[in-house]
Image (tube, rainbow, N blue to C red):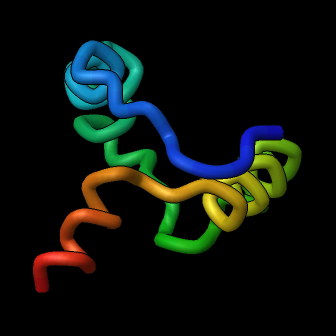
Amino acid sequence: MKFGIRKPSLRKRIAARTSMKRQIVQRAGLKMPRGYGWARNPKKYVYNKVYHRTTFNIFSLLKKLFK
């Protein structure tokens, strides 16, 4: 598990928004309500929960500094 600052990746950011899987789920209306990640994939939900609590984004850090 990673601790500390996450490295931003422009390629991954763009890929997440333009993936075919995302487009199919969005257009078919198969989205689950916010907060229901544990129902769809519990293992991924737990991993993401821990990851987001132990790391932070450089952009959010800059936003807090210059606010």
Nearer to the camera, 49 or 63: 63
**Looking at the image, can residue 24 be seen?**
no
Q: Quadrant of residue 12?
A: top left
Give the side of residue 45 with respect to residue 65, left or right: right
Total marks shown come to 0
Rendered view: 3 above or below 49 = above
Q: Residue, x 51% and y 58% (percent of image)?
A: 56
The residue lying at 33 percent from left, 65 percent from top is 61
Tell me if residue 41 can be seen: yes
Residue 23, percent across and down?
Answer: 26, 27
Q: Tell me which corner region of the image, top left, top right, bottom left or bottom right, holds residue 49.
A: bottom right
Q: Is residue 7 depicted above or below 12 in this figure?
A: below
Q: Position of residue 42 (x, y in %)?
A: 84, 52
Work out which residue is located at the far left of the displayed protein and give it.
66
From the image, which quarter does the N terminus lie in?
A: top right
Q: Most extreme residue toward the bottom, as rendered?
A: 67
**In the image, 3: left or right of 18?**
right
* Residue at the image point whose x is 29% and y is 40% from the top: 26
- State the image quarter where residue 18 is shown: top left
Looking at the image, residue 36 sits to the left or right of residue 63; the answer is right
Task: Identify the image quadrant of the C terminus.
Answer: bottom left
Instruction: Decide which of 13, 6 is in the foreground and name it.
Output: 6
Q: Position of residue 4 (x, y in %)?
A: 63, 51
Q: Is residue 48 above or below residue 61?
A: above
Q: In the shown orientation, is residue 10 left or right of residue 22?
A: left
Vertical order, 12 against 17 (above or below):
above
Q: Position of residue 62 (x, y in %)?
A: 23, 64
